[in-house]
Amino acid sequence: MRYIKANPGKIYFVIGTLLIGSMIFVLFKVYGYENTWKLWQVPTLMPPFADLRLIPGGAETFRRGLDPTIRNPGDPYGRIFNYPKIWYLFFYTSIDQEDVIWLGIVIFALFYIGLISFPGKLDGLGVLLMILVTFSPATMLLYERGNVDLLIFFICAMAILALNYSSLGAALIILVGALLKIFPLFGLSIFFGKGRKQFWRYTLLVVASFGVYAWLTFSNIRASWNLTMRGKSISYGVNVLFDRYHEVFSELLKRLLPAFGVNGLLDVLPYLLGLMLLVVAVVAGLRNSLKSNFEGSRNLTAFRMGAFIYLGTFLMGNNWDYRLAFLLFTLPQLAEWVQTLKGKQRLLVAAAIGLVILSSWHFVLARWCSLAFSDSETVIIFDEIANWSMFFMLAYLAIVSLPDWAKEIIRNPVRGIRLTGQPGDAGS
């Protein structure tokens, strides 16, 4: 009873998600499985949990004496196994396609446990935003595919929770997540709240440990990277727009820079633009400060996890939109900021919230716009503008909310690192 009185928002969130989830389950039974997904404009693949099927499919192929990274007849879609080496542990189990449904239920249950556990505090606005993104088309795509990012989300949530009890425990949890999928490394940003000493200690520990693993399995990591399917729609990242309109950008560059090799320039141009936008956001963030009493709070820790995962994956290239589900980590803190900050910063936070909702719901918005205007390409370009804008907004907010010692390192790396270990190290 004491917990319910102290955390009414979290109770409302649990009740709300269970009610909506139950309604969706009823729709599956009454309206039909595939028809229900179409309500969110989520493209459906059958049999269910298509992405999860790659793991038991690889295990079946391996047991036949074949290499699933070359040919994978165990997968119902014939996809090549493209997960890091640590996933090969499943090849030595007896799992097969018959286990997919219960495996999907397990990882979804873990996702939900992480989802309801990580927020430190939820007010009414926070509950509304969390529900909107939890049941957004982008997150529903994650559920429909049964993608292992459900498990990665749970791991990231556990790292957030562990930080208040054991920094080493949180670091080890992030390392486990990084071994499964590389992008949880961006979650090392949660250590900004622990002071420069602990930040460097545990960041170096995880990076060094992962570096050893990457060196030992480099050929596998490179193959996994090259084999990963990258979308030109229902995706975000620096490459999406340039991949989709490759010919348009190629012709434009030929006219503007006839002396340069267009193909080579197009390979690096998206990353250069992304880095330039990041630099602008960093410079703007360093010139401002966000004075609040949130430092050390779990919601700020979660914001850093979600924001830096989005920033890092955006710069890595193409990501399917189901990875936008990690923006859920940013919402409790954004909800608090938009109600406590004033002036420009409040407007920027409000804009960031709007962009998160817009990007998460763009499947449905795209459908409405295509029916109204019969022009899907305009909708795709608009979505890309939203994704790039959100990249800038989250980068700015991530920098402006850093503790002073971290900003000092960015401004002057040599002097900032030399200050490590001096008095005042434990705080901001």
Image (tube, rainbow, N blue to C red):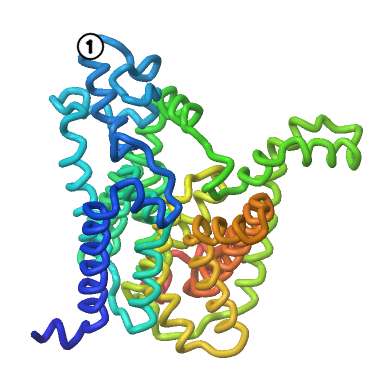
Residue 335 at x, y = what percent? 42, 79
Answer with left or right where residue 309 lies relative to residue 157: right
Residue 293 in the image: above or below residue 211:
below
**Figure quadrant of residue 102:** top left
In which quadrant of the rendered image does the N terminus lie? bottom left
Q: Nearer the viewer, residue 14 or 76?
A: 76
- Tell me what residue is drawn at x 54 percent, y 61 percent: 365
Viewer-proximal residue among 290 and 70: 70
The residue most toward the left is: 1
Decide: is 382 above or below 142: below
**Image position of 60 with respect to 172: above or below:** above
Which residue does the image show at 32% across and 28% down from the upper left? Answer: 85
Residue marked by disc 1: 64
Residue 230 % position (x, y): 52, 37
Which of 32/52 is in front? 32
| Furthest residue toward top | 65
- Name the spot of residue 173 as percent of width and height, x first: 26, 51
Q: Residues within 10 Å of mark 1 (few under 14, many from 20)?
A: few
- Left or right: 425 with respect to 251? left
**Quarter-of-image position of residue 125:** bottom left
Residue 336 x %, y %: 41, 82
> What SS does tag 1 mark?
loop
Q: Answer yes or no: is residue 197 visible.
A: no
Q: Residue at x 56, y 43 (%)?
A: 317
Amino acid on which disc 1 is placed:
Arg
The C terminus - image quarter: bottom left
Report whether 93 appears left or right of 160: left
Q: Is residue 403 visible?
A: yes
Question: Total marks drawn?
Answer: 1
Which residue shows up at 38% across the image and 15% down it? 71
- Which residue is situated farthest in the front direction here? 30
